Amino acid sequence: MVRGDRNCLVMAGLFSAALIFFYPLVLPTPLLEPDEGLHATISQEMLEHGEWIVPTVHGQPFLDKPILYFWAQMISLKTFGMHEWAVRLPGLLFGLLGSLTTGLLAWRLFGRQIAAIATLMSMTMFLPLVMAQAATHDVALVPWTNLAILCLWATETSSTRRQQVGWLAGAACMVGLAILTKALIGVAIVCIGYGLFLIFSRRLSLARCVRLAVVLLVGLLMASPWFIAMEIRDRGYLYYYFIERHLLGFATSTQPHGEESWYYYAPFVLLGSIPWSWTIVPLLFDEWRGRKSRTATAPEMILLLCWLIGGLLFLSIAKSKLSTYALPLFPAIAILTAVSWQRFVN
């Protein structure tokens, strides 16, 4: 296939994927329970009462989710009115932003052509596509995870100290937005993936550990005003959310979704990434064969594999499990499948 035809095919695929992505906006589908209806009720109630700090449902504080997604829904409802499609619009936009940032990261790692393919695959994977059409906070976490990893990767390739500081500041901003979206789960996946990358690429050093710690600290400070305001308005919120919901939710089965088996995420990752997941197999085989022949694995591949495998192990070890928690792993799958298509199907 000549280059022009291939580019036209990719652009046609992206356009078709966009139509599939946004078709729920024109359908008279009622809000799905429990999440869509619950989140719409919270955002509507906050908007009606002029409340921008404490999420409430039927007048009672809702303490299980941070604020960023509710802010997005409130802005949508205030701008477009109380409609089902206005409730769904933020999720679709966050889903689209997740696909675009997946392509942006792929561009930074591998170039423009793989970026276009990765964007297309990200938009058409089954689970991310379905979740973007429902009001879920996890969809909004994906773009911040992508951009945090992109900024951390850029610090590795920066040629000047000023560029490095700029990328570190960008990573801290993305960490702050991730905390305001889903608290610590996105931060954990980024840190585990990047930390394993430093280890397996033999780049681990005190300076890099300090930079990562500074990124986490600054990101936490950026997100802290809302959490402090919540603690002032509802005493005990910080203990409930970070200790009971996060620490005990990770280590014990006392929280919701705490009784699932260790392999819970395997079918969601494999089936949720159809129709593209099977294309990773020849890529992994080729990389393994290269390792056996003493061919060094590219650092970009190490980053993606550490992100995917490290994040999957972290989620599997946790006691509290839910399919949507795995959404930040799908960009790594999309980029890996794009690399595989470029390498074997071109």
Image (tube, rainbow, N blue to C red):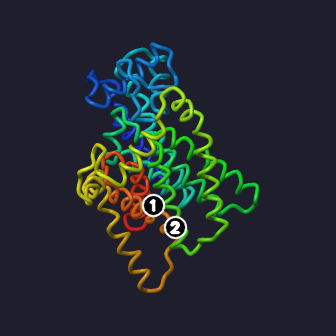
Q: In the rendered view, would you say 152 is above or below 224?
A: below
Q: In the rendered view, would you say 251 is above or below 157?
A: above
Left or right? Give the position of 67 relative to 245: right
Label 1 sits on what residue type? Trp
Which quarter of the rendering shows the N terminus? bottom left
Q: Secondary structure at mark 2?
A: helix
Q: Are marks 1 and 2 in contact (CB under 8 Å)?
A: yes
In x, y percent, where is residue 212?
A: 61, 58
Q: How many marks?
A: 2
Q: In the rendered view, would you say 264 is above or below 196?
A: above
Q: Secondary structure at mark 1?
A: helix
In x, y percent, where is residue 74?
A: 47, 22
Residue at the far bottom: name it. 293
Taking depth in this image into account, of 129 and 5 the one nearest to the observer is: 129
Marks 1 and 2 sit apart, C-alpha to C-alpha, by 8 Å
For disc 1, the marked residue is: 307
